């Protein structure tokens, strides 16, 4: 990626995605692999490409991402946020359509911690009357 590029960070659950976009042909590189080699699910591919559909900039930017932590769904959500933020840096006019689609809002949901005296966050051990 030479020339003008834009950097942004996206987070979701335990995942952190560092995203660089640059004007190009629409190539995706995730952790030095092709997009579908890393994610292997068409639904996650669709989620990641949504910001480009909303801004009508499909195949206009090359995307390079390093993502770590969490699972595949969390990583895809982190990439969605990172790509959206980078697009806003590239062109301020993209802010309204991305905001209206909800792509610039960090999803605050996190895993609830396990409580003592219980097998999980909310699950209880079986109650026995006798």
Image (cartoon, grey):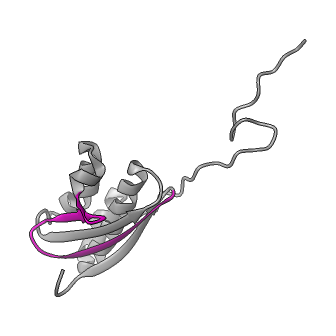
The residue stretch that appears in magenta? 14-34
- Residue 72, given in percent of the width and then of the height, sits at 38, 50
What residue occupies the far top of the structure in this picture? 130
> Is residue 8 visible to the viewer in this orientation of the structure?
yes
Q: Decide whether residue 42 is among the magenta residues.
A: no
* Image vertical order of residue 78 relative to residue 85, above or below: above
In this view, the residue in front, 86 or 76, is 76
- Judged left or right of residue 128, residue 115 is left
Q: Is residue 95 above or below residue 37?
A: below
Q: Quadrant of the N terminus?
A: bottom left
Instruction: Please name the residue shown 70% across and 45% down the image.
Output: 114
Left or right? Give the position of 63 relative to 104: left
Residue 126: which quarter of the image? Answer: top right
Q: Nearer the viewer, residue 59 or 94?
A: 59
Q: Position of residue 56 (x, y in %)?
A: 15, 63
Tell whether position 27 is magenta.
yes
Q: Residue furthest bottom?
A: 3
Image coordinates for residue 2, horizontal then vertical, percent: 17, 85
Instruction: Locate residue 116: give its quadrant.
Output: top right
């Amino acid at each position: 990626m030479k020339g003008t590029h834009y950097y942004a960070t996206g987070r979701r659950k335990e995942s952190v995605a560092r995203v660089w976009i640059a004007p190009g042909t629409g190539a995706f590189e995730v952790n030095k692999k092709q997009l579908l080699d890393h994610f292997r699910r068409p639904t996650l591919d669709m989620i990641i490409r949504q910001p480009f559909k909303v801004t009508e900039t499909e195949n206009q930017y090359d995307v390079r991402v390093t993502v770590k932590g969490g699972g595949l769904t969390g990583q895809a959500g982190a990439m969605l946020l990172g790509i959206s933020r980078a697009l806003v840096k590239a062109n301020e006019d993209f802010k309204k359509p991305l905001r209206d689609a909800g792509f610039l809002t960090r999803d605050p949901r996190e895993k609830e911690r396990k409580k003592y005296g219980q097998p999980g966050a909310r699950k209880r051990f079986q109650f026995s009357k006798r």
